Amino acid sequence: MSLALVSKINIVSIDLPLQRPIVSAVGRYGKWPFIITEITLDNGIVGNSYICPYLVNFTDSIERVIRELFRLFENQPLAPAAFYEVGMRRLSLLGRSGIALYALAALDIAFWDASAKDADRPLCEHLGGTLAGVKAYNSGGLWLIAPEQLAQEARDLRNEGDFSSLKLRLGRKTLDQDLRAIEAVRSQMNADDDLLCDFNQVLSFTEALRRLKDLDNQGLYWFEEPIPYHEFRNYTELRQHLSTPLILGENFHGIDHATLSLELKSSDAIMPDLMRIGGVSGWIKTAALAEAYKKPLSSHLYHEVSAHLMRVTPTADYLEWMNWVDPLLVEPYRIKDGHLVIPERPGVGLQFNRDVIDRYRVKR
Ligand SMILES: [Mg+2]
């Protein structure tokens, strides 16, 4: 049976307002940029993807890299895993990371979506897994806001999908402020619910030594990115002083970073980001690494594609649920009893809302 040929590409960038602004150690954001990539096969099937490259002013450059990389695959038989290898070899001249890798990920995800649609299967089944709910936590709030606001927000977040697990941002000016924030959120949770926390890289190594030791008895599920993400050796050292698991990985740029971090034993668990890890193909390789090193793997953003991938990740732990994309989707994924429900639709099954795209399209 011959494979369908990759025939056309369409790309659009959007700057979408957020329901709850991000107030984190890395910045304040009221909007969030998306690049949507659509690939059409010669049999009419359309595969799509979205990536969120953080800085809207760079979407133009990334779109250009996507178009340039696409020329490698135009009129070729659709073979996502082989395309990834070709793309990574091409990127070696530019560096296997950064916006060049984001562009390859945008294509890779759309290719896999098209491939699963061509097989008329949900992506997780196309990859050899089965459909089932995926354990998730609500990550869509609890930023560095006043402790008085946190209790109400924790209640709201729980009610968005019967969540028992939430993530709180920490790394306020003083230990006391962090403790008050934990207390406020905990007041809305049951004793055995999981409270995760994220420092968004705000502490220096020495600050982290002090702060994390003081928070180590709080029963938090994990400490996420307390120090700058690339300080792998400092993470290794920090781990030796703590009993709460350390996690990092949303800033791994491709499998090279994931491999280095695991070799250096810099965390107890990892959390790759679908875009930065290199799309579906990059994720599958990283999931195999996590299995080899016996480390739990959680996801970062992109809950739809990540949920499919968690179904074929041997050490899968938590799915991050952040529904920023929902206004863009005709039929957003649903949450039930704290689990993401993967819809029984071919591919990833995302259809974008054209009116919303037109309203928030980035003007050049
Ligand atoms: Mg994080």
Image: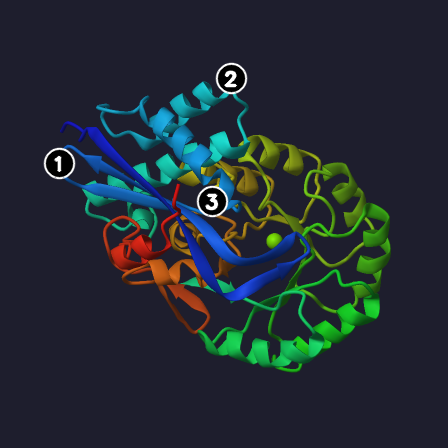
Q: Is residue 17 above or below residue 300?
A: below
Q: In the drawing, does residue 90 fall left or right of residue 290?
A: left
State the residue position of label 1: 43
In this figure, which residue is indicated by the disc labeled 2? 93
User: Label 1 amino acid?
Assistant: Asn
Picture residue at 64% right of the left edge, 76% below the top: 150
Colouring rule applied to residues: rainbow
Question: Residue placed at 45% from the left, 40% from the top?
Answer: 59
Residue 362 percent coordinates (x, y): 39, 47
Nearest to N terminus: mark 1 or mark 3: 1
> What percent of the width, then of the height, locates residue 27?
64, 54
Element under disc 3: loop
Left-right relation of 110 to 244: left
Q: Quadrant of the N terminus?
A: top left
Question: Regarding mark 1 in the picture, which secondary structure is present there?
Answer: loop
- Location of mark 3 (residue): 274
C-alpha distance separating marks 1 and 2: 34 Å
Q: Is mark 3 within 8 Å of ligand 1?
A: no
- Percent from the top left, x then y, of residue 301? 49, 53
**What is the C-alpha distance between the residues marked 1 and 3?**
27 Å
Q: Quadrant of residue 256?
A: top right
Label 2 is placed on what type of residue? Leu
Q: Do residues under tags 2 and 3 come within 8 Å of each other at their CB atoms?
A: no
Q: What SS does tag 2 mark?
A: loop
Mark 2 neighbour class, 10 Å CA radius: few under 14, some 14 to 19, many 20 or more: few
Q: Going by the image, does 156 lie left or right of 208?
A: left
